[in-house]
Every structure is written in structure tokens, then in C-alpha cells.
Image (tube, helix red, strand yellow):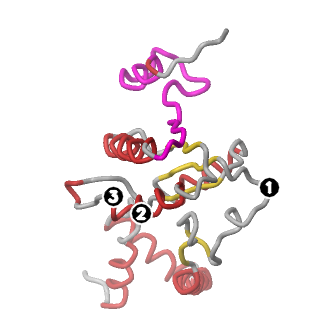
Amino acid sequence: MSFSPLIQQLIKSLRCLPGVGPKSAQRMALYLLEHDRPAALELAASLHEAVERVGECASCRTLSEVSPCGICTSSSRDRSVLCVLESPVDMLAIEQTGGFGGYYFVLKGHLSPIDGVGPDDLGIDALVERLRGGEVREVILATNPTVEGEATAHYIAEQVRELGVRVSRIAHGVPVGGELEFIDGGTLAHALAGRRSLN
């Protein structure tokens, strides 16, 4: 049995979401059509409005309805510290900790020559230009601890050092509450290399 063209189109559209395969998309589509049409209409309306109204902050490049965004216009944040991230979701994760009071710059990806993603695609020139203003004294590189994330952090560090701005990297290692016997070797190696003095 095959579904009607409209249902097939809905299933195909849902597959654009990360981690959603054919079966998951089919379950979602059928659930919305069979059990919760009002929610389906609300989802469609919210998605349409977000696509129409959400853009990019001209300063930090995160997703925002206004530009500059609320974080970039806040006068209570430390203008001398700039945290560089790969994506808006990373920015949300750091904000939820409540432990960072500086500003952000979102790359929207990482260097990946195999995928044709270079420095120009990530706005690194805009980042360097922002740092030339002289207001930022420290750049915190918070790219993901993947091969691409490390390469991106290294590349940015080289660009920033030429400007005389301090560069730091977020720590990687053993999670709080973790037990050493269950930690993989790569994570332990990072933790040992990034150890800090207690005295």
C-alpha cells in the first residue's frame, strides 16, 4: 500500500529533520493527521512564522527576530570577553549554565575541506574585523572537541594571536560525577593534558 501524494509529501518533508528516518517521519505524519490536527496546524503556523521572521544577529550571528539580538544589546555583559561557538544551540547551552557573562560569535559550522567549508564560509573575517576594534581582550574558543572543531579552533587562534588578543580554549575532560574506569582514552588524555594546578 502506498500513501496518497499529500501524505507522501508530508513524510518526505519531515525527513529533513536531523535523526528522522523514513519510519519516524511516517509515524509523525500519521500521528498528526490521525490524532492531533490542531497541533499540526499550530506547528505549521509556527514554522511558517519562524521562517519568515527569524534572521541572523548582525553582531554575533545567532538566530534572532531582532538585530542586534538581546544578548548583544545587553549593557550588563562584559564586552572584553568573546566566546566563539559553532552553532546557536551551543550558545543556548552556555547561556543555560549562567556562568558566562561575555558576548558571543557564532560560526555556524566548522572548517571542513572535505565538505568545501573554508574560513570564508564561517565568517572568520568578520570575527577578526570585530577583534580589530580593540574592545575584546580575550577570545574563548568553544568549538566542539571533534577533529573539525579542533582544526577550527587552531585556525582561529592563529588569526587572533596576530592581533595581540588573549586566546583560551574551553577545557575538555572527565565530566563531573564521572568515574575514570568508564571514561574513554581520548577523553582521559585531554583531561591529563589540560590539568590545572590546585596550589
Q: Is residue 124 magenta?
A: no
Q: Give coordinates of residue 160: x percent, y percent.
A: 45, 46
Tell me which amino acid carries mark 3: Pro
- The secondary structure type at the circle numbered 3 is helix
Dot label at residue 76: 1
Q: Give coordinates of residue 182: x percent, y percent.
A: 45, 20
Q: Which residue is mark 3?
A: 119
Left or right, 67 with reference to 88: right
**Dot 1 alpha-carbon crowd within 10 angstroms: few under 14, some 14 to 19, many 20 or more:** few
Q: Give coordinates of residue 40: x percent, y percent.
A: 55, 82
Q: What is the residue that sits farthest to the top in this orientation? A: 199
Left or right, 44 with reference to 182: right
**Dot 2 alpha-carbon crowd within 10 angstroms: few under 14, some 14 to 19, many 20 or more:** some
Q: Which residue is mark 2?
A: 123
Q: Nearer the viewer, residue 182 or 24?
A: 182
Tell me which amino acid carries mark 2: Gly
| Mark 2–mark 3 distance (CA, rounded to whole Å) | 7 Å
| Mark 1–mark 2 distance (CA, rounded to whole Å) | 26 Å
In the rendered structure, which segment of residues is drawn in magenta? 163-192
